[in-house]
Every structure is written in structure tokens, then in C-alpha cells.
């Protein structure tokens, strides 16, 4: 590297090289003092900085960290569908790292929300890999634009917390390539995260830290990753095997660098591999050096709080708004019910827990605005049953109000890293309270606080409005007031389907696995890919979200721009008197295919801000990857020739227009053999010529004739040609030999 300022591995002793491949303590790289290589700090992530106050001792106290801006976790931010905004969040986080001298922030986490019960859904982006990758890339690009590194995590397939240190996620190649890898792949190829963190779990039997196929063949050789891979905290169980697989850094250290020295001496680690892994660590230190050398930097606390507020505004999804109950007039008599209004649930639990620089709950925001309200907590945030006195007080508060704002959701103890939920339901006492309040006053708006989807069906008819506010970070209260009083229209869209019942989820039959493994039996049919393909009812579909405005999409057109590429365009119009944003979503719907494909898949989107009655043209270029599937037959991506629908709409179930393109296909074909079926021979460009020769030779009486009744033709179609004798005796054998000879001549 031309910008290297530290010695290269060639200048280090074997012991020094080995020492670079583990941390100095739980939150630092290991420096090489004698050679002047510093041991910079690396720490969580992912929705703000969690720099432990015990950072120099290496201890882990998840809730004891220096103040940092708490941005909305990915559960919220993912609903913004706004990569530009997400990049601004990343830039702000990068600045906070400079102040705190943190060289790498551990995030974002882009694992797929395979099942909404997953304990870390609050810090993951979506059930859809395209959306996850195209949003989270903003964090990586934003942080790194400030000269600070990110750690894209957890590579790969950390989709549940149950048994996460041991479980083998058994996943087909196709599902890995189409669902569990693309968010990582997109970010690696477009933003080169400086580090990647491997997952705890095993994939098809092999721990990620020791998985050479994962860390070297796919990540580096196929995708061109240039950074380093570190272990998740405690995920490296065999230093030698991991280093050979392509893991540069063990975190936290187990103080076993001598194992690497011995293995290098006795040939269990090749010198080139150790050089590669250790040099990666020096390159990382070089990349972060400039930012880590800045002295006395102070980030702008208020400006970052403002970014957190804007991000929170765009994170909310308006699910229901009967009788236009929202926005609420400032003059209305308002009752606010629910402890969450006073004690907001604004982030998730576990390693991502941040100490915010400021905190605005909804009641604080109302006080700031001078809006008088009647508040009753209604319930406690613990797991205790209903408190009748609190419930009675809330019902009284609601009785004479013009509108009741009810803050319901999941208390902190209900979801966290480290365990999965066992129900989608919010606590029963909250539902009971909602029913009691709704019996007194029909004008109820429920404002939900939760990191992953909760069931809505059991109580939705008690509320005229439902605002899904996820976890909104430190400025959430102010942002809620912005939306509830109509200063800004909600514009969030669901990044995750809301099922009617958890047992509708396609992964439930294999959740959370048994006896050390979990089979991803649903394959690529995750989330809406399942619900939409199989016509299953959901409460709210992927991509859904209401606005105070109304929009129309028209003029959907698609033109072919190459053999397997297309440009799609449409016009989106704000048909209301309210300024607001709409997200135009593009789904590709494959026609007839050789493999089972989802009905449609998100392949492009754009959030468009439109003033009242304004229109905008949007266009999107779809490359080959928009049409391809992972073929296990070719062990590669494959675009089949044929017609593809290009759907443009406002959710996966609200498609405004469809255009069709006929693609040429990539022409991939496997050589024909005796094991290819007669049907495959007939469909192949060369094989079909041979089949024609068979027919002609049959007509001339030089070869037995092919059967000409429908039933026999059907049998033949799916029969490898080496079995034709079963159907036709000696004649079948003669025909198959003729075919193999003819084919050999044609292909040379
Ligand atoms: C988590 C990571 C986190 C690390 C360090 C692990 O338990 O899985 O996401 O970055 O701890 O706190």
C-alpha cells in the first residue's frame, strides 16, 4: 500500500506478527510497541457509539458507556427507505468516533429477519436483502467518509439467538446466495467496509470463524473484500483453523498468540497466510491513523440530536388512520396513556446499548411545546399483571378526551440480543387496558414501541389509528410530536411484513431448530416472498405505510437496455394538499422459470419528497442481478430467457402498474450427457438438432421411430436417455447411442 506509514509484516518478528491477530483487550487492537504500531480502540455500534467507561480494563459493562447520540436502531431506520438520511447518520457516528478515539465502530448488522421472533430483529434491517443492503450501506459509507472503520456483521446467518454460539444454520446454497448473502455482498462491493465480523453460529456444520469457503472463497476471492475479518466476541474456537480460514483477528483475546507462533513454526500455518492476515491488521491501522491522530475534536451534540430527530420522524410507519384521526389538532383535549410516553423504550438491549447525550420522551416534547394533556401511565413496564388502580385512572383520563394517545409496546425485558421471543403479542395487560379505554372513548390512536413486529390483529379494532414507532432513539419523543401534530407527514414503510399470526410465518416449522441445528426449509421464501407467492393474508404487507397525503403512480414503462437489462420509469404524483414523501418500489416478477421463484422481489426503490399536487418522474436501471436466481445446477447466477413483469407500486401488495420485458437470457447451458432427459435434449440448442436428426433417421428407416402417442412422449420427456431402453427395449438403446454420437460430433 502506497499510504503505509507503519512497518509491514516483513519488518516484524514472528511473535510480533502473531500478536497482531488477536486483540489487546476486549475493546482494543493489539499494538506492537517496539515497532510503533498502536493498539486502537474498536467498539459497538451499531446505532451510535457504545464506548465502555471501563474501556481500558477491557471489562464489559453493557450499560456503562460515555454519552453518545442514540440514533434510531435499524428496526426504525430501515422503515425510512432513505439511504441519504442513513448516510448522514453514519457520518455523525463517524464524527463521534473521532472525538472518542474509536477506530472502528462495530456495525451495521445486516442479517436477515428470517422470523420476527428473532431477538436481534431490532438491530437488523429487513426480511428483504435488497432493502437491507441498500439502506445499511449508508452507515458504512457515512462512517468511513470520516476516516473511521465499520464492522459489517454478523457474517453470516445469525438469524436467531437461541443456541447462537453452537447452532448449525443448515441453508441451501441458493438461499444463502439469494437471501442471506446479498446485503453483505452489496455493501462489500460498493463500500468496502474496513472490517467484517463473523457470526457465532455454524453454517452447514462449520463455525463461521473457521469457514474458509465463507471467509476466503466467497468474501475475498469472489466479492473482492479488501479489509479484515474479526471474530464476534468469543466466536473463535480454534485460532489456527480460523487464521487458515481467513480470520485476521480474534476478539476478545484469549491470550494464546503462542499457538499461532507454534503453528507457523511447525507448518500448520503457511507463512504467506500469516503474513496476509497480519498485514491486513497493519493496513487497518494505517487507514484509521489520520482520524485517530485528530486532537481535541468535539462533535456538535445539538446537530447530531437533530439528525436523530429527523431519522426518527422518517422511521415511523402509519399503519391505520381511520377518520383521519391523525394528525391531532393542537386545540384538542388530549389524553396520553401508557408508561412508554413518560419512559420511552428507545433502543434495544445487549451489546448495542447506548448512553444518550440527551433524552426526549413524548411527555417532555409536549411540555416543550406547551401542549396540556391528561397523562395516566395505565400499566407498569415490568412483567407484573394488571394494576387495577392504574387501569381505572387511565379509563377516567380517557373518558372526556377528544383523542386518546395510547403508548403500547414491548418492555425492555421482552426483547434483546441473547434470546428470542416466544410470542408476537404485546403484554396482555396492555391489551386489556386498551379494550377498557376504547369502551369509554372510540377516538384512540395506538403508538407502538417495539424492536420487532408485534401482532396487531388481536386488538386493532379498538383503535382508529395505529402508528408503529419501533424504537426511535434519543429524539423519539420530539419526532413523535412532529408527526402526531402534523408538522411532518409520516413516510415510513414496513421493512418487515406484519403477519396475522406467528404460525403463518414460513420458518415456524423449523424454528428455532433442534439438537444443535436449524434447517432453513423455507429456502428463499422468506417474509413477503412467501406470503405474496402463496397468497397468504397478512395484517400489513412489506413496503406498506400510510401518509397524511395521497399519491398516485402512473405511466409505468419498461424498456430493454441490453440482453438482460432494463430501464423502468413511472410518474408519481402527490394528489393531496399536504407536502409529504412517497416511496416508489420496483418489484421484478419472473415468468415461467425452471426453479420455484418468489412471485416478485424488490429490486429498486426511491423515496420522493413531493409538495402538494407536485409530480415527479422516476426511473431505475435494472441490471442482470435484478432478474437472476442462484442456480445450484450451474453453481452460479442464472438469467433465464423469457418474459419478466416489472411492477411499480407503493407496497408489495399495492402495485400501480406492470410493464413487461422479454430478456434474452444468459445462454448458460450444461453439456448434455446420457443422464440428460429427452426433454432437456429437446430444449437445448444443439440437443434439439440431434433430436431432429433422430426423427429424420426414423422417417428414413435408418433408426427405430420415436413413439408418437402423447403418453409415451410425456414419459420420454422426463427420462434420462440412458433409460430409453426401459421404454423401448433395443430400439431405445440404439436411439440413445445415436444421440450421444451425434452430439459428440456437433460439439467437437
Ligand atoms: C455481539 C456483537 C458485538 C460484540 C461486542 C457480541 O456479543 O454479538 O454484535 O459487537 O458482542 O460487544
Image: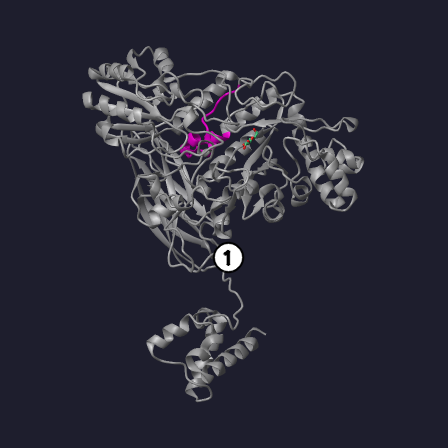
Q: Is residue 382 magenta?
A: no
- Disc 1 CB within 8 Å of nearest ligand 1 atom: no
The answer to which image quadrant residue 435 occupies is top left
The residue under the point 42% across, 42% down is 511
The location of residue 16, given as percent across then percent down, is: 77, 33
Query: Dot 1 lies on which element?
Result: loop
In the image, is residue 644 above or below residue 746?
above
Q: Is residue 42 left or right of residue 734?
A: right
The location of residue 302, given as percent across then percent down, is: 48, 16
The location of residue 532, given as percent across then percent down, is: 34, 47
The residue carrying pointer 1 sits among few (fewer than 14), some (14 to 19) or many (20 or more) residues within 10 Å by Cα, namely few
Reading the image, the residue beneath label 1 is 632
Q: Is residue 78 left or right of residue 248?
A: left
In the image, is residue 510 above or below residue 447?
below
The location of residue 449, given as percent across then percent down, is: 37, 26
Q: Choose between 656 and 140: the one closer to the eye.
A: 140
Q: Is residue 83 magenta?
A: yes
- In the rendered image, the residue lying farthest to the front is 515
The dominant secondary structure in magenta is helix
Image quarter in which the N terminus is found: top right
Q: Is residue 544 left or right of residue 85?
A: left
Counting labels gives: 1
The residue under the point 76% across, 46% down is 267
Q: Choose between 414 and 694: the one closer to the eye.
A: 414
Image quarter in which the C terminus is found: bottom right
Q: Choose between 292 and 531: the one closer to the eye.
A: 531
Task: Give the magenta-colored segment's residue range.
Answer: 68-87
Residue 569 at least partly seen:
no
Q: Choose between 583 and 680: the one closer to the eye.
A: 680
The residue under the point 41% across, 25% down is 312
Residue 172 at least partly seen:
yes
Specify the quarter for ligand 1.
top right
Amino acid at each position: 500500500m502506497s499510504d503505509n506509514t507503519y512497518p509491514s509484516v516483513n519488518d516484524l518478528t514472528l511473535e510480533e506478527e502473531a500478536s497482531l491477530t488477536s486483540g489487546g483487550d476486549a475493546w482494543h487492537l493489539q499494538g506492537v510497541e517496539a515497532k510503533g504500531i498502536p493498539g486502537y480502540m474498536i467498539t459497538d455500534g451499531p446505532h451510535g457509539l457504545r464506548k465502555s467507561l471501563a474501556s481500558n480494563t477491557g471489562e464489559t459493562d453493557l450499560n456503562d458507556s460515555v454519552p453518545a447520540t442514540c440514533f434510531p436502531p435499524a428496526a426504525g431506520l430501515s422503515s425510512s427507505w432513505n439511504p441519504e438520511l442513513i448516510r448522514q447518520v453514519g457520518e455523525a457516528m463517524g464524527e463521534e468516533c473521532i472525538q472518542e478515539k474509536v477506530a472502528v465502530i462495530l456495525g451495521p448488522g445486516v442479517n436477515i429477519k428470517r422470523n420476527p421472533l428473532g431477538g436481534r430483529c431490532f438491530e437488523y434491517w429487513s426480511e428483504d436483502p435488497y432493502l437491507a443492503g441498500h439502506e445499511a450501506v449508508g452507515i458504512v459509507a457515512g462512517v468511513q467518509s470520516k476516516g473511521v472503520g465499520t464492522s459489517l456483521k454478523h457474517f453470516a446467518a445469525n438469524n436467531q439467538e437461541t443456541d447462537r454460539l453452537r447452532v448449525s444454520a443448515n441453508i441451501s446454497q441458493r438461499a444463502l446466495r439469494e437471501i442471506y448473502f446479498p446485503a453483505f455482498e452489496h455493501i462489500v462491493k460498493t463500500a468496502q467496509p474496513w472490517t467484517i465480523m463473523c457470526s457465532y453460529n455454524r453454517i452447514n456444520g462449520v463455525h463461521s470463524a473457521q469457514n474458509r469457503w465463507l471467509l476466503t472463497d466467497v468474501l475475498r476471492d469472489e466479492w473482492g473484500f479488501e479489509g479484515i475479518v474479526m471474530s464476534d466476541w468469543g466466536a473463535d474456537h480454534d485460532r489456527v483453523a480460523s487464521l487458515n480460514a481467513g480470520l485476521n483477528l480474534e476478539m476478545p483475546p484469549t491470550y494464546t498468540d503462542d499457538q499461532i507462533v507454534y503453528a507457523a513454526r511447525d507448518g500448520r500455518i503457511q507463512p504467506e497466510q500469516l503474513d496476509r492476515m497480519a498485514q491486513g491488521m497493519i493496513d487497518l491501522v494505517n487507514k484509521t491513523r489520520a482520524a485517530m491522530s485528530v486532537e481535541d475534536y468535539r462533535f456538535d451534540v445539538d446537530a447530531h440530536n437533530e439528525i436523530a430527530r429527523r431519522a426518527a420522524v422518517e422511521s415511523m410507519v402509519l399503519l391505520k388512520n381511520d377518520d383521519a384521526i391523525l394528525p391531532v389538532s393542537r386545540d384538542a383535549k388530549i389524553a396520553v396513556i401508557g408508561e412508554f410516553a413518560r419512559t420511552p423504550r428507545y433502543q434495544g438491549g445487549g451489546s448495542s446499548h447506548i448512553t444518550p447525550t440527551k433524552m426526549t420522551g413524548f411527555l417532555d416534547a409536549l411540555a416543550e411545546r406547551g401542549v396540556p394533556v391528561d397523562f395516566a401511565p395505565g400499566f407498569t413496564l415490568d412483567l407484573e399483571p394488571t394494576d387495577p388502580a392504574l387501569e381505572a385512572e387511565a379509563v377516567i383520563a380517557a373518558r372526556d378526551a377528544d383523542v386518546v394517545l395510547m403508548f403500547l409496546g414491548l418492555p425492555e425485558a421482552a426483547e434483546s440480543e441473547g434470546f428470542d421471543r416466544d410470542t408476537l403479542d404485546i403484554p396482555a395487560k396492555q391489551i386489556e387496558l386498551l379494550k377498557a379505554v376504547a369502551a369509554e372513548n372510540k377516538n384512540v390512536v395506538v403508538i407502538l414501541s417495539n424492536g420487532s413486529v408485534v401482532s396487531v390483529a388481536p386488538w386493532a379494532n379498538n383503535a382508529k389509528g395505529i402508528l408503529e414507532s419501533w424504537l426511535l432513539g434519543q429524539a423519539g419523543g420530539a419526532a413523535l410530536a412532529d408527526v402526531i401534530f402534523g408538522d411532518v407527514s409520516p413516510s415510513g414503510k414496513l421493512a418487515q411484513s406484519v403477519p396475522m399470526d406467528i404460525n403463518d410465518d414460513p420458518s415456524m416449522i423449523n424454528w428455532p431448530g433442534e439438537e444443535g441445528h436449524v434447517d432453513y426449509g423455507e429456502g428463499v421464501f422468506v417474509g413477503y416472498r412467501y406470503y405474496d407467492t402463496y397468497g397468504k393474508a397478512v395484517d400489513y404487507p412489506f413496503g406498506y405505510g400510510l401518509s397524511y397525503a395521497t399519491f398516485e403512480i402512473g405511466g409505468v414503462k419498461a424498456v430493454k437496455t441490453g440482453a438482460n437489462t432494463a430501464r423502468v420509469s413511472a410518474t408519481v404524483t402527490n394528489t393531496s394538499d399536504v407536502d409529504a414523501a412517497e416511496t416508489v418500489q420496483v418489484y421484478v416478477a419472473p415468468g415461467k422459470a425452471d426453479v420455484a421463484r418468489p412471485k416478485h422481489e424488490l429490486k429498486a426503490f426511491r423515496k420522493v419528497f413531493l409538495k402538494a399536487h407536485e409530480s415527479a418522474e422516476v426511473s431505475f436501471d435494472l441490471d442482470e442481478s435484478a432478474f437472476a436466481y442462484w442456480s445450484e445446477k450451474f453453481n452460479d447466477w442464472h438469467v433465464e430467457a423469457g418474459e419478466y413483469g416489472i411492477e411499480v407500486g407503493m407496497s408489495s401488495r399495492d402495485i400501480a402498474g406492470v410493464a413487461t420485458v422479454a430478456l434474452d437470457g444468459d445462454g448458460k447451458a450444461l453439456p448434455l450427457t446420457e443422464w440428460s432427459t429427452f426433454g432437456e435434449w429437446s430444449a437445448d440448442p444443439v440437443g434439439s438438432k440431434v433430436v431432429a436428426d433422430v426423427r429424420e433417421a426414423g422417417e428414413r428407416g435408418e433408426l427405430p421411430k420415436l413413439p408418437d402417442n402423447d403418453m409415451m412422449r410425456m414419459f420420454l420427456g422426463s427420462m434420462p436417455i440412458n433409460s430409453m431402453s426401459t421404454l423401448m427395449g433395443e430400439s431405445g438403446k440404439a436411439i440413445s447411442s445415436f444421440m450421444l454420437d451425434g452430439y459428440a460430433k456437433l460439439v467437437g
